[in-house]
Amino acid sequence: MKHVIIGAGAAGVTASKKIRELGRDNEIVIVSTDDSIHSRCMLGSYISGERDEKGLSFIPDGFFKDANIRWLGGVIVKSVDTDNRHVLFDGGAEAYDRLLIATGSNNIIPPVKGLREARNVYGLRHLSDAKAIRKNTANMESVVIIGAGLVGLNAAYALIAMGKKPVVVEALDSIIPLNLDKRAAGAYLERFEQAGCSFHLGRKVVEASLDESNAVTSITFDNGERIPCESVISATSTRPAIDFLANSNVACSGGVIVDKYLATNVDGVYAAGDVTGLSGIWPNAMKQGTVAAKNMCGTATVFSDSFSAKNTVNFFGLQSLSVGITEPAEDDTVEIREDRNNYEKIILRNGTVAGIIIQGNISNSGIWQYLVKNKLDVSMIKKPVRKLSFADFYGVEANGEYKWS
């Protein structure tokens, strides 16, 4: 059986490991645009110089050789011929018996006047993006980042490490708005500002002014304010990388459409990771890669763990964890505990923990992901919610046996 995987990220590489584990005789080929294996979570460390290209890899040296996997790196897939089961690219093609689409997603430059035409506007999704930022901003002073989510702040953190003072623009009135509430995010805002980063919150970029060489020289906000800049990093949104499937029979709607087995509408074709639009976090991409691999090898396995409402933040040595919702609805109950070094917010809804934010000491946090994910009723437990542990959900039978309740 010949398995071809398009994409060498978390989903694709994890799938290749599982396919090899399930059959030593399986032929495995990975085709990827990337010519090196890297974690996109660490791209900021490459920009700052903290890590080199090799330091971004999440596989051991010699992985492909040892696992007998053929890797075609630096190859752009043009299309997939599902009728004849071929992956087509410049200069060649690969036949397949089973195909896994694991191409991830690409950055989207906002449709702002002048921004998409500019030659010095960068995304931050791939190693090639990080290389361009590191090279082209090395001697620049004024770099603007659009978007104050985790990707935007990773870029800002890297530029600060390079000795720069980036400017961050965010349409909402808080940073990291999808992951933390204003109180927790404020602790990072203060640290970034102390390090020389400046913010324009509640502002939208409406125009980029270009010079004769199509380089951005300034940007204008929705309030009419204009600031100079030598380059722009766009960190606002992404889109599943599915353009190469335009003329195939694989059904897409936003991302590749898959069933509970991560199979597409085309026999023998599966998809996993960001390209499916199911989840945008690394652990879930790995889980999807594993499940898809099992199904490709004939072991029927359902992907049921789509929970992705968990985020960690760590800048300037301050750690935060959020699980579930971060802002309460009108009828929710909120418990808050904070001191000089820690902040804890628990949101209760109908007797269950709907969300939590922990900042500072985030040890022993596994219980919260379990409670939120499984919607366990905590209303009958006679102790403060913040003091819950796994032990509170065990009972003891008459014979001394522990029983999960």
Image: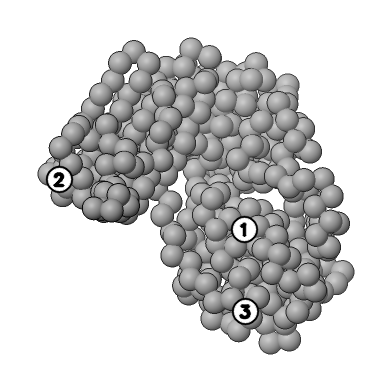
Look at the picture and state if 43 lies above or below 79: above
Instruction: Give the residue at x 44% y 60%.
Output: 305
* Residue 66 in picture, x, y percent from top left: 84, 56
Q: Are marks 2 and 3 in contact (CB under 8 Å)?
A: no
Rendered image: mark on residue 298: 3
Look at the picture and state if 155 lies above or below 350: above
* Residue 11 in picture, x, y percent from top left: 62, 58
Query: Which corner quadrant of the image does residue 265 belong to?
Result: bottom right
Q: CA distance from mark 1 to mark 3?
A: 18 Å
Looking at the rendered structure, the secondary structure element under dot 2 is: loop
Rendered image: mark on residue 11: 1
Rendered image: mark on residue 380: 2
Side (left or right) of 86 relative to 174: right
Instruction: Give the residue at x 20% y 32%.
Output: 384
Answer with mark 2 or mark 3, whichever residue precedes in sequence: 3
* Residue 336 in picture, x, y percent from top left: 23, 27
Q: Nearer the viewer, mark 1 or mark 3?
A: 3
Q: Residues within 10 Å of mark 3 (few under 14, many from 20)?
A: few
Side (left or right) of 399 relative to 274: left
Q: Are marks 1 and 2 in contact (CB under 8 Å)?
A: no
Looking at the rendered structure, the secondary structure element under dot 1 is: helix
The N terminus appears in which quarter of the rendering?
bottom right
From this viewpoint, is residue 93 visible? yes
Side (left or right) of 232 relative to 303: right
Query: Which corner quadrant of the image does residue 392 belong to?
Result: top left
Rendered image: mark on residue 268: none
Looking at the rendered structure, the secondary structure element under dot 3 is: loop
Answer with mark 1 or mark 2, whichever residue precedes in sequence: 1
Residue type, numbered disc 2: Met
